[in-house]
Image: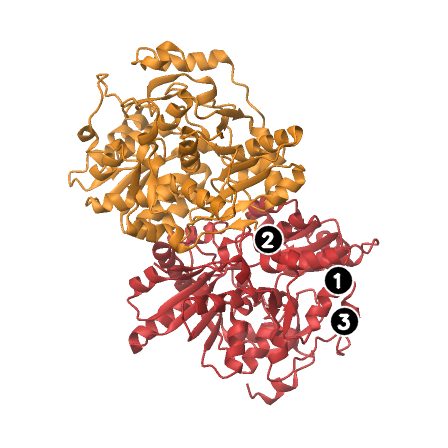
Chain colours: A orange, B red
Amino acid sequence: MAIKVLLNEDEIPRQWYNIAADLPSPMLPPLGPDGKPISPDMLAPVFPMNLIEQEVSQERWIDIPEEILEILYRWRPSPLHRAKFLEEALGTPAKIYYKNESVSPAGSHKTNTSVAQAWYNKQFGIEKITTETGAGQWGSALSFACALLGLECKIFMVRISFDQKPFRKVMMQVWDGNCVASPSRETNAGREILEKFPDTPGSLGIAISEAIEQAVTDESGKTRYSLGSVLNHVLLHQTIIGLEAKKQLDKIGEKKVDVVIGCAGGGSNFAGLSFPFVLDKINGAEIDVIPVEPYSCPTMTKGPFAYDHGDVAKMTPLLPMFSLGHDFIPPPIHAGGLRYHGMAPLVSQLAVEGLITPRAIHQLECYEAAVMFARTEGIICAPETSHAIAAAIQEAKKAKEEGEEKVILFNLSGHGLMDLQGYSSFFDGKLKDYELPQEEIDRALKAIEGLPVPEISKTGKW
Amino acid sequence: MAIKVLLNEDEIPRQWYNIAADLPSPMLPPLGPDGKPISPDMLAPVFPMNLIEQEVSQERWIDIPEEILEILYRWRPSPLHRAKFLEEALGTPAKIYYKNESVSPAGSHKTNTSVAQAWYNKQFGIEKITTETGAGQWGSALSFACALLGLECKIFMVRISFDQKPFRKVMMQVWDGNCVASPSRETNAGREILEKFPDTPGSLGIAISEAIEQAVTDESGKTRYSLGSVLNHVLLHQTIIGLEAKKQLDKIGEKKVDVVIGCAGGGSNFAGLSFPFVLDKINGAEIDVIPVEPYSCPTMTKGPFAYDHGDVAKMTPLLPMFSLGHDFIPPPIHAGGLRYHGMAPLVSQLAVEGLITPRAIHQLECYEAAVMFARTEGIICAPETSHAIAAAIQEAKKAKEEGEEKVILFNLSGHGLMDLQGYSSFFDGKLKDYELPQEEIDRALKAIEGLPVPEISKTGKW
C-alpha cells in the first residue's frame, strides 16, 4: 500500500533546526522606536528569557526537552501521506506527498509551538500566558497547551470573530482558556477604544495591544505574552515538521524532493516544513521552495522588504520583513490565517536571498483545489491550507505537461472542520476573487514611510 | 514515553471477527410482518446480496478485501493511547488505555463500516446509496466513503438537525453527498407527512422511510440503502478496532485487560472494540465488558429483550433486541447518537447471555468526564464518547478505592469538534439530568404489545 509513512517513537526528531545558523548573509536585527537595534533584555517584560534566548540564538541545532517531546508524541510524528488518489485524478506523472498536521488535537500545526512556548514559560516560573487570536486557531492551540501544562491562558479574540465563530470560544473554554472579545474593558487599550468606538468590530492590532498590556502590567511578574507565528523561536519549533518529513521520505527511499510547498500567512507552517529542505538547497540541492499567499494579501509577491511593525497599533519592534504596511486591511477572504500584512523575518530573508520563490493564488482556485482534495484524499482542509494544495496541483499539472516525474511535497497544515462556512459560501457561489489594485497597495505602504529602510532594499538587488 | 502504541502497515488486521460464530446459544432470526423469519432474498431490494451474506454469515473470520484495507489504511491502524495524564489526575493505580477512533477524516469510527459498505455496494454494481442521518455523523461518514469510491450518496437528514447543524450538511457537501431535509418532497413518505404536518421537525423514523423508499423504487436497480449501526454486518466491520487494540496491547506486553468499555447507541462502536475481548471471555478469561448508555435512554438497563421494529415507521423487520419500544422518544440530551430506542441484536444477545454488563450514566457526569479528559489527555470528545470516559473514570476510582492495579480499555469513538454546542450549554449551566419515570417507559413499551415475544424473554431467566 505505502500511501502513509509513519515513524516510530524512537525516530521522532530530538532537535529543532535553526536556519539562522545557515543564512548566507546575517539577519538584520529588530529595531526599537528609536531606530536602534533592540537588546534581548528589552523584551524581558513580554517574553520569558529562555524563549528570548532562542529568538536570538545562532545555534544550528537546539535540543527539544524530553517533557515537550512527551506531549508532542501524543499526535507526532505526524503521518506523511502519498496523495495517490489525487495524482490519479490529475493524471500526473508527479508524485505528491503531504505532511498531515491536521491530526493534532487542536487541528493544526500551531500546537507544535504552543506546547513548546507553554513549557518554556512554565520552566521560567510563569503562571499565566496572554495572547490574541483572530479566527481562533492560535487561541485554541495555546489553550490546549496551557491545559496540559497547568498554566492559565487568557485570549483576546477579535470581536467580530468572537461573535461570528462562537464555537472557537467554546473549544478554548473546554481547554480552560479564558477567551474574551477584544476590545475588552479589562485593559486601558481596550477601554480607550470602546469609549471612542463602542461598536467597533475589533482588530488583531487592538487584540495584540490588549494581550501585551495585560502581560507587562501584571505586578506579580508571573504573566507573559505569546505569539503564534512570525518570530524566530516560533518558526524554530515548527521545524519538527520538515525534519520528520525528511526521515519519512528517507524511509521509503525517496531520495530527492523537487518542490516543497506551504501556505504562508505569518510564515510558521511554511517554515516548519521547508527550512530543513532549504538547508539542502543552501548545500547545493536543486529544490523549488514555494510559500503560497493569497492573491488578495500579496505580502511577498507585491510588498517591499522593509522595516515595519508587526501590528496596527505599533506596539511591536520594527521587524525586517516583507510588508504591505501595518495599516493594510486585506479583502475579506476566508483564509483568515493568511490575512496578515507582514511575513516572518526569517522567511522574508530567504526570499531576499532567492532561496524561496513566493507565489500568490486566488481564493476560488484554492477552494476548487480543496474540494478536489477532499473528494480524492478524504481530508477536508483549512482554507489556509487550500493555498498549498492549489500550488501542489499547479506543479503536478506542470509536471504532466512537461512529462516529468517530479516529487512534490506540501504541508497539510490543518483541517477545516471549524471553518466550513467558507466551503458553504463557495458552494453557494457567494465567494469571489479580489484583484488588488496597485494604488491600494501604494496607499497602504504609506504607513512605512519614514521608518528605517534596510540597506539591501535600497540597492534593489533582490 | 510509551503513551501511544502504533501498528505498522503489515500489522493491520486482515480479517474481521464475526461473533455470531461463537455465541453460546444461536441467534434469533429477524421476523417479517407475518411473524415468520425473513429470508435473505427478502432483503435484496434494500441491501446488496454480498452484504446480506455477511449479515447472516456464521463464519468466524471474514477476509477484509485489499481495496478496503487500502482506504482504511489512510488513518488506520488507529493509535492506542495510555491515558497517563488522566490516571495522574485521578490518582488511580489503574492503567487506562483508549483506542483513538477520532483520527478518522470524518471524525469517528463510522468510516470503518461506511468504506466497507460503499465498497461492497460498488462490487455489486450499485451506483447510488441512500441513508438517513440524525445528528449527521453517519451521513458524513457515508459521504466520505462514497466520494473516495465514486458512488452517488443521498442523505435524508432529520429536519430539525438539518436546520440546527448547518455545518454537518456542508461537510457532506464537500464530499459530494447530497443531503436534504427530511421529510422531503422527493418521496411519497415525505410528501404524505408534509401534507399533514407542514411544520414537522422530522424524525429518524421518517428519514429511514424516505431513504428506503428511494432505494427500493429506483427502477434502474442501481440504488441500495445503507445503515450505520445495529445490523450484524455493520458491527462486523467495526471489529477491526478491537483486533487492532489486542495487537497493540500485546506489543507493549499488556497481557490482561480487566475492563472493556464503549458507549452504546445502536451498538456498533461498543461492539467494534469489545467483541474480540468477549471472545476471550467466552474462552474463559475474566473481563468486565461494559456498554454504556445514557440514563435518559436506558435501552439495556431498563428495557426488555423483545421483538421490535428498528424504526418508528415500522419499515424494518422485527429484530430480537433490547428495546424501549419503537415509539420511545428520549429526552433531548446532547449525545444524539445514543438516543435510540433499540440495541443491536448481537449486543443484545450478549447481554442476555450475561457476557456483558450494561450501565447507564447521567448526562452531567458525562460532560464532567469529557472536560476532565480534554484538560488532561488533550482531546475534545464527542458527547456520545463521553459516556465511555465517564464509565472508565468510575472504574478507575473503584480501582483506587480497592487498591487494585486494574487495566481499563475504552473506545474513544469520535471527536466533538462538530458538537461544541453541548459543551457550551454545559458550561452555561443549561444542561440537566433527566430522570425517566417507570410509567413513561411502561407507556412507550405499549408499542411492542402484540408483537412476537422471544422464548427466552418468557422465561425471565436473564
Q: Distance between the residues labelled 2 and 1?
A: 27 Å
Depicted B147 relative to depicted B37: above or below: above
Circle 1: element type: loop
Q: Position of residue B356 (x, y in %)?
A: 51, 77
Q: Quadrant of residue B361?
A: bottom left
For mark 3, name the chain: B
Circle 2 is placed at which residue position?
Answer: A1
Is residue B180 visible to us here? no
Circle 1 is placed at which residue position?
Answer: B48
Circle 2: element type: loop
Is residue A339 visible to us here? yes
Which residue type carries mark 1? Pro
Closer to the camera, B50 or B183?
B50
Circle 3: element type: helix
**Can marks 2 and 1 be said to lie on one chain?**
no
- Pointer 3 local density, CA inside 10 Å: few below 14, some 14–19, many at least 20: few
